[in-house]
Image: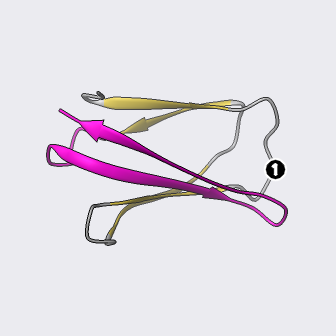
């Protein structure tokens, strides 16, 4: 479970990688860009619950989930 921050790490980063976090009903609650191989995302303003992360660029699409406590 996450509390105030989540850390997104990748061995490669495309210059146009877009990060989107959705809540359980599909609403966008955070959007940003991934600009380095290690990016910290502040989630302190999110309510407790399950969230979905989508990272996409021109070549790749990745989806995962996390729980905010």
- Counting from the top left corner in percent of width and height, residue 34 is at 64, 46
Boundaries of the magenta span: 43-69
Mark 1 Cα shell of 10 Å, populated few (<14), some (14-19), many (≥20): some
Judging by the rendered image, the residue that carries numbered circle 1 is 14
Residue found 29% across the figure and 27% down from its top: 1
Question: On the rendered structure, is 34 left or right of 29?
Answer: right
- Counting from the top left corner in percent of width and height, residue 33 is at 61, 53
Q: Secondary structure at mark 1?
A: loop
Residue found 41% across the figure and 54% down from its top: 52
Q: Quadrant of residue 2?
A: top left
Question: On the rendered structure, is 57 left or right of 65?
Answer: right
Relative to residue 58, is residue 5 depicted above or below? above
Question: On the rendered structure, is 8 left or right of 30?
Answer: right
Q: Within the magenta stretch, is there residue 49? A: yes
Q: Compare residues 34 and 47 and report the one nearer the observer.
A: 47
Q: Within the magenta stretch, is there residue 68? A: yes
- Counting from the top left corner in percent of width and height, residue 14 is at 81, 50
């Amino acid at each position: 479970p996450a509390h105030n921050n989540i850390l997104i790490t990748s061995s490669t980063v495309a210059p146009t990688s877009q990060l989107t976090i959705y809540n359980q009903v599909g609403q966008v609650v955070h959007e940003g860009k991934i600009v380095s191989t290690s990016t910290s995302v502040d989630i302190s303003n999110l309510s407790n619950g399950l969230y979905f992360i989508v990272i996409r660029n021109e070549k790749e699409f990745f989806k995962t989930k996390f729980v905010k406590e």
